[in-house]
């Protein structure tokens, strides 16, 4: 299949929680999470990346686009991405998604993340599809490559789809995800940023897990030039800046 054909088929939406959906949810407005819809317009199949907050609204959005949800991808276990308790409130997430669907929906996560996802959401390994490394998930004819990027959490992962990197909390336009929360690992984050994501071409567009900048996306080339997390030239420099 040519790139042009892929472009025509690709269904890709970036949704800002608290603005594009869950508008009445103060936690969503505060956390400014991005949720992504990725699919194949020809087959009408779509998956949701990090469904959280008003899951019913997300399902309605998919349906109003004429698409059919066939699964979910989780970047990492934090409740603002997959649901769970946070700041004293219950955030809807994959548990609600599975309850709402008449058919079994695969929820794709890295295997290292599974126990953390279960603790946060109550969704156990029996309802998760566990990946060990760089797998490809196909949605219709659209391939999504899973890129493991531990650091923010043990099983954090990014998704590459047609020149786009959906990065969760591994990488923002400015900064990267915290490594001081349970399961975080500064050295692993350095490794993820400098080896696994180094292979991502400069013209690939970074789509982060939160809107922490004025822009909602940027090329990886721009990001590598401007984002201070790419400044350290060695693990020792990195530890001095980010190792705590
Ligand atoms: Fe996070």
Image: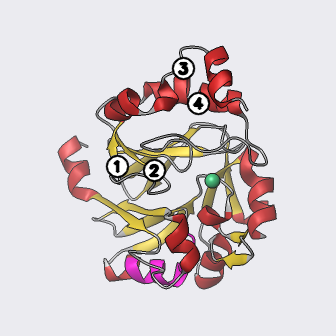
Which residue corresponds to mark 1? 217
Mark carried by residue 208: 2
Residues at marks 2 and 3, CA–CA distance in whole angstroms: 21 Å
Measured from the top left, where is residue 38 in percent x and y? 40, 60
Q: Residue at x 74, y 68 (%)?
A: 121
Query: Dot 4: what SS?
Result: helix
Which residue corresponds to mark 4? 192
Residues at marks 2 and 1, CA–CA distance in whole angstroms: 7 Å
Which residue corresponds to mark 3? 232
Mark 2 crowdedness (10 Å alpha carbons): few <14, some 14-19, many ≥20: many
Q: Is tag 4's residue or tag 3's residue first in the polypeptide sequence?
A: 4
Q: Nearer the viewer, mark 1 or mark 3?
A: 3
Query: Dot 3: what SS?
Result: loop
Measured from the top left, where is residue 127 in percent x and y? 72, 66
Could you tell me if residue 139 is visible in this image?
yes
Q: Residue at x 59, y 14 (%)?
A: 234
Measured from the top left, where is residue 43 in percent x and y? 33, 66
Q: Is residue 54 magenta?
A: yes
Q: Is residue 52 left or right of residue 228?
A: right
Residue 23: image quadrant is bottom left
Q: Are circles 2 and 1 on residues that touch, CB within 8 Å?
A: yes
Mark 1 crowdedness (10 Å alpha carbons): few <14, some 14-19, many ≥20: some
Q: Main secondary structure of the magenta part?
A: helix
Residues at marks 2 and 4, CA–CA distance in whole angstroms: 15 Å
| Range of magenta residues | 51-61
Q: Are circles 1 and 3 on residues that touch, CB within 8 Å?
A: no
Query: Dot 1: what SS?
Result: loop
Please name whichever residue, 201 or 98, is drawn nearer the observer in this view of the structure: 201
Q: Residue at x 34, y 54 (%)?
A: 214
Is 216 above or below relative to 240?
below
């Amino acid at each position: 299949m040519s790139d042009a054909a892929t472009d025509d088929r690709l269904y890709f939406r970036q949704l800002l929680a608290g603005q594009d959906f869950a508008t009445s949810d103060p936690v969503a407005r505060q956390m400014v999470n991005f949720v992504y819809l990725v699919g194949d317009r020809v087959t009408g199949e779509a998956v949701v990346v990090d469904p959280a907050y008003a899951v019913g609204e997300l399902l309605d959005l998919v349906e109003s686009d004429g698409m059919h949800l066939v699964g979910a991808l989780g970047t990492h276990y934090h409740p603002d991405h997959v649901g769970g308790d946070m700041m004293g409130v219950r955030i809807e997430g994959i548990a609600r998604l599975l309850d709402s669907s008449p058919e079994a929906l695969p929820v794709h996560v890295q295997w290292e993340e599974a126990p953390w996802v279960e603790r946060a959401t109550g969704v156990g390994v029996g309802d998760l599809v566990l990946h060990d490394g760089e797998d490809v998930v196909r949605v219709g004819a659209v391939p999504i490559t899973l890129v493991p990027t531990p650091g923010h959490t043990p099983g954090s992962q990014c998704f590459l789809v047609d020149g786009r990197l959906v990065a969760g909390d591994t990488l923002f336009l400015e900064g990267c995800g915290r490594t001081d929360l349970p399961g975080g690992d500064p050295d692993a984050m350095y490794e993820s940023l400098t080896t696994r994501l180094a292979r991502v071409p400069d013209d690939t567009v970074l789509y982060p897990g939160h809107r922490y900048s004025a822009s909602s996306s940027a090329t990886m080339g721009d990001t590598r030039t401007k984002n201070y997390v790419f400044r350290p030239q060695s693990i020792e420099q990195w530890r001095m800046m980010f190792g705590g």
